[in-house]
Amino acid sequence: MSDTMSTEESPLLEYQPDHRARTHEEIYNRFSKPQKRAIVAIVSLAGLVPLFVSGCFVPSIPQVAKELDSTPAVVSLAVSVSVFASAIGALVWSSYSSFYGRSPMYLWGMPFMSIGSFAVASSSDLSSLLFWRFVQTFGCAGGLSLGAAVIGDIYKVEERGTAMGSFLGAALVGLAISPVCGGLATEYWSWRGLHVALGTWGLLQMLLIHIFLPETAHPHTRGVDKMGYSRRVVVWLNPFSSLGLLRSPNIMAVTLANTFTLASEYVLLMPLAYTVGVRYGITSEALIGACFLPNGLGNLIGAPIAGRVSDTVVRRWKDKRNGVWVPEDRLRAAYVGGLILVPLSLMVAGLTTTYIDGPIGLAINLVCLFAGGMGVDLVLTPISAYNIDIMHSRSAEVIAATSAFRSLLLAPVLGLIIPSIETIGVAATNGIAALVALVGYFLLWLTIRYGDRMRAYVDVGYSSADNN
């Protein structure tokens, strides 16, 4: 093969001379290891909030419908509203974080969440509930994109995956435990009390961030630094400009893979009361909520493993190339999750629910929930770190753009899961989801194999060694 021919091993960049290398190291040595761990803990807590706020509402829908004299189908519009608000909020907070910094955006967003939560708790009709539900979710929507950007700010590329794994693990645990908390609050307390607690949580988190979270953006990279503006000057930015990053074939391919994989998590979790609950005679909302816990445990264990494995893969392939870094190498860490755990857990769960009775069937389903949670993390963590690797200077924006696009794709899909189960059954629905997940892995394989050509096709301002 000719040396000039492009292959999957063509580097995005090579390391710069010694002076730049020293400057590069100094940027990532601004914080000690204990400080970095504390920062990751703080942003992980903030990253847990958006998915928790979205998920905890679902178990309370029947009670909300009864109190507001409506129907569950109409009240469930609040779920769609929160998906839309999450997409818009992530784009807004990420765009402004590139201009003002990460910490201010947390502090601007949390009051919206708290006010929205208190107002949701006091809603007396459906229209006010939907409006304040939008405000509530909009306020906390930056948790994922801002947290990912903070991790990109403080960890260099060979260490980023491990920290990203811990961060995403916390976020996905929020998704898994939110129905448990929502179910317990609905059954033993009140859905209004739950939202008062969320509002209080927002205020406490704002205080925690104000006291303990330093600004992590690299020196002289924020818009406010470059333009010499006061931080008190309000600058109007276009939050939708970051969606232009999706023109990149690389980013679009891994975003679709991310979406297809996360959809598998929802296929297992969303209809749990109608699949595992009905099949094995579980009627208590609290017990059904407890069935979500194995998935959360899989997230909690799988995410740090996924991050560490992706960092190891990056270092190993970089050594093989004598110090040359190819960003697509990180995606090789998604092999076990994308090709084995995710599709296999879907298929086994579907077949088990259909054909195996009693405690054995229930136990196999719980194992599948655990394996599915771990598998999803083994895919999502390398993808998130990869997006930051190739768009480090716009890390918050790329995470927000991909999250918004994913939310818009998932919103209609989620509405089809239960009707599909009712029409063609659990096994067939899970089988389709498994095939879709395999298509997602195929997109990752294409990106690994042809990533250099894809980057050359559309250049959206990929990162260089100087800022990565």
Image (cartoon, rainbow, N blue to C red):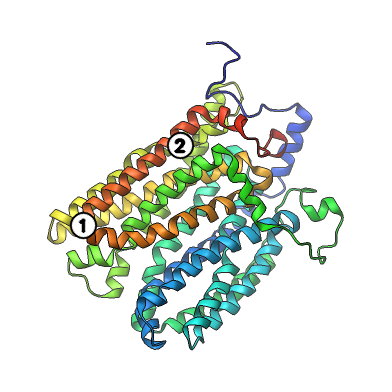
Q: Give how far across and how far down residue 21 sits, in percent.
A: 73, 32
Please name the amino acid that badge 2 sits on.
Leu
Residue annotated with mark 1:
363
Q: Residue at x 36, y 82 (%)?
A: 63
Name the residue nearer the viewer: 294 or 409.
409
Q: Nearer the viewer, mark 1 or mark 2?
A: 2
Q: Is residue 321 above or below residue 280?
A: above
Q: Residue at x 49, y 38 (%)?
A: 310
* Number of the label disc, if any, that sits on residue 444: 2
Q: Residue at x 22, y 52 (%)?
A: 427
Q: Is residue 18 above or below residue 165?
A: above
Q: Is residue 53 left or right of residue 374?
A: right
User: How crowded is the residue under tag 2: few (<14 C-alpha within 10 Å), some, or many (20+)?
Assistant: many
Whichever of labels 1 and 2 marks the residue nearer the N terminus, that label is 1
Q: Is residue 210 above or below residue 257?
A: below
Disc 1 to disc 2: CB gap under 8 Å: no
Determine the CA span between mark 1 and mark 2: 32 Å
Q: Is residue 183 left or right of residue 163?
A: left
Please name the amino acid that badge 1 sits on.
Ala
Label 1: which secondary element:
helix
